[in-house]
Amino acid sequence: MATRSYFLLGMLALTCSLAFASDPSPLQDFCVAVPNSQFVLVNGFVCKDPKFAQADDFFFTGLDKPGNTSNQLGSKVTPVNVVQIPGLNTLGISMARIDFAPYGLNPPHTHPRATEILTVLEGTLYVGFVTSNPDNRLIIKVLQKGDVFVFPEGLIHFQRNAGYGNAIAIAALSSQNPGVITIENAVFGSNPPISDDVLAKAFQVDKKVVDYLQSVF
């Protein structure tokens, strides 16, 4: 009876560990991606033969350079994921630099495959995320230089420059390819567009408002 109980506890622990995992753990030292492979991709990229791995497969340069924030949002995200560093394939981690012009915004978005931890390098940021249904509670914080904030996996979040000067942040994410869904682009800029009947009813607005927003995005 005791043996059976230990077995069940072991299986439960294993199930829990899998449930909380993000990208699956690698079964080798590394798996340098071959991004343009003709083979079918299953949860990652095809690997090159480890004997041919080079230092540049694990290298990226230029994260010290500011991103161009001369756009409507006043922000620029510079990603460093498996596309930029093939050696990140199967390692379950990536990062990004985010530049903000004064009052610039990284709009509400979600990373479907990653938790994000953000560190402010310069400036002041107003950040927050929204919990899931049914509460949809907004959790917000004003961050200064050196502050760190976490956005849980899959939850809608944002960052806005709350200062008078430029702001810079570095984000680390728990996936080699975290993905990003920008809410307004997904809802009002889908291709083909979502029916304005659907969106008008969902947002409780006139269809003319929906049509205008779809024309913008």
Image: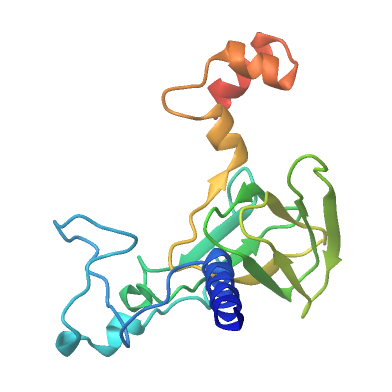
Residue furthest toward the front?
1
Left or right of 65 in this view: 133 = right
Residue 31, picture quadrant: bottom left
Q: Quadrant of the C terminus?
A: top right
Q: Quadrant of the N terminus?
A: bottom right
- The answer to whether residue 105 of the structure is visible from this angle is no
Q: Give percent across and percent down for residue 214.
A: 56, 22
Vertical position of residue 71 compared to residue 45: above or below: above
User: Front-most of 18 and 87?
Assistant: 18
User: Front-most of 80 and 179?
Assistant: 179
User: Front-most of 200 and 79?
Assistant: 200
Vertical position of residue 187 compared to residue 146: above or below: above
Left or right of 77 in this view: 135 = right
Q: Give percent across and percent down for residue 161.
A: 76, 58
Residue 61, picture quadrant: bottom left
Vertical position of residue 117 compared to residue 130: above or below: below
User: Front-most of 164 and 6?
Assistant: 6
Q: Give percent across and percent down for residue 65.
A: 52, 73
Residue in the image at 58% along x and 80% along y = 6
Residue in the image at 15% along x and 86% along y = 52
Residue 32, picture quadrant: bottom left
Residue in the image at 32% along x and 63% along y = 44
